[in-house]
Image (spheres, helix red, strand yellow):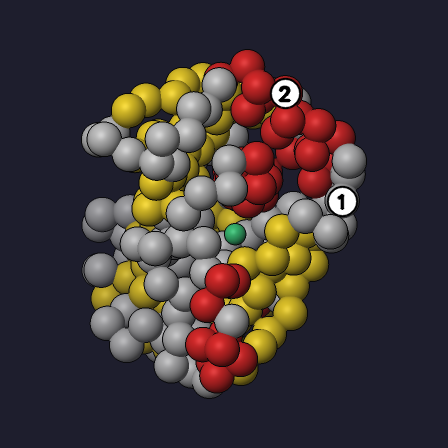
Amino acid sequence: MTQALFRDDAYRVETEAVVLKSEPRGIALDRTVFYAQGGGQGGDRGMLLFDDGAAIAILNTVYDSDRATILHVPAEGAALPPPGARVIARIEWDLRYKRMRAHTALHLLSVVAPYPVTGGSVGDAEGRLDFDSGEAVLDKAEVERRLNELIALDKAVSQRWIADAELEANPSLIKTMSVKPPMGTGRVRLIAIEGLDLQPCGGTHVARTGEIGPASVTGIEKKGKINRRVRIALGAA
Ligand SMILES: [Zn+2]
């Protein structure tokens, strides 16, 4: 299995690591800063750098079938490193930071629109959430105004872990109906935005909401009788 360093420090750009196994579909390391695709957020891109000067471009990051080993997907035809090789794993930070800002903005969007979330996607400085908003009317300008208000509060974003049993006893913590938080390991990661939001999440977030910067609501679409899709986009960092 791979130690997922991005869970404790989303700002860490690189780490030393050792190759566990090496296949065209992916290179597994004992530890990594590369976020593995999941929860509506894409896998990281970046580079693996070797002592002999060799470098392998990584195009995506995914979980292996055991959901515990993280595979760094190399460019097609890349020369694969042998198991045991030492490596520096470095993510494409600009891309990751855009996703961290967008992801945190979506947490705030779920505060502005306090309805059950049925789906979502984190893009590069943009994203969307689908809400089961019932008969409620979501006004684009109003959602945008309140979202920017919350961002400007510059609240701290932090994480803590709770036991599965504690989460089961507090089902209201789960906002997303389609994406169940990863349970079964005995504990679940909660993301708190100081005084505003608390929900289980495995993604990468910025440390303060102010880092998100100005956001615009680029669309609110009807996706069925009671479902609304809200799209947002962020400015430059
Ligand atoms: Zn999150």
Residue at mark 1: C-beta within 8 A of ligand 1: no
Q: Which residue is mark 1?
A: 155
User: Is label 1 or label 2 in front?
Assistant: 2
**Measuring 55% from the left and 52% from the top, which residue is drawn there?**
204
**Measuring 43% from the left and 24% from the top, which residue is drawn there?**
137
Mark 1 secondary-structure assignment: loop
Tell me which label, 1 or 2, sits earlier in the chain. Answer: 2
Judge whether 36 appears above or below 150 on screen.
below
Q: Is residue 145 left or right of residue 109?
A: right
Q: Position of residue 184 (x, y in %)?
A: 38, 81
Which quadrant holds residue 180?
bottom left
Q: Which residue is mark 2?
A: 145
* Nearer to the camera, 149 or 157: 149
Total labels: the figure holds: 2
Callout 1: few (<14), some (14-19), or many (20+) C-alpha neighbours within 10 Å?
some
Badge 1 amino acid: Lys
The answer to whether residue 70 of the structure is visible from this angle is yes
Q: Residue furthest top?
A: 141
The answer to whether residue 59 of the structure is visible from this angle is no
Q: Is residue 182 left or right of residue 101?
A: left
Badge 2 amino acid: Arg
Which quadrant holds residue 1?
bottom left
* Nearer to the camera, 158 or 137: 137
Judge whether 187 appears above or below 151 on screen.
below
**Measuring 69% from the left and 34% from the top, which residue is drawn there?**
150
Judge whether 176 appears above or below 141 on screen.
below
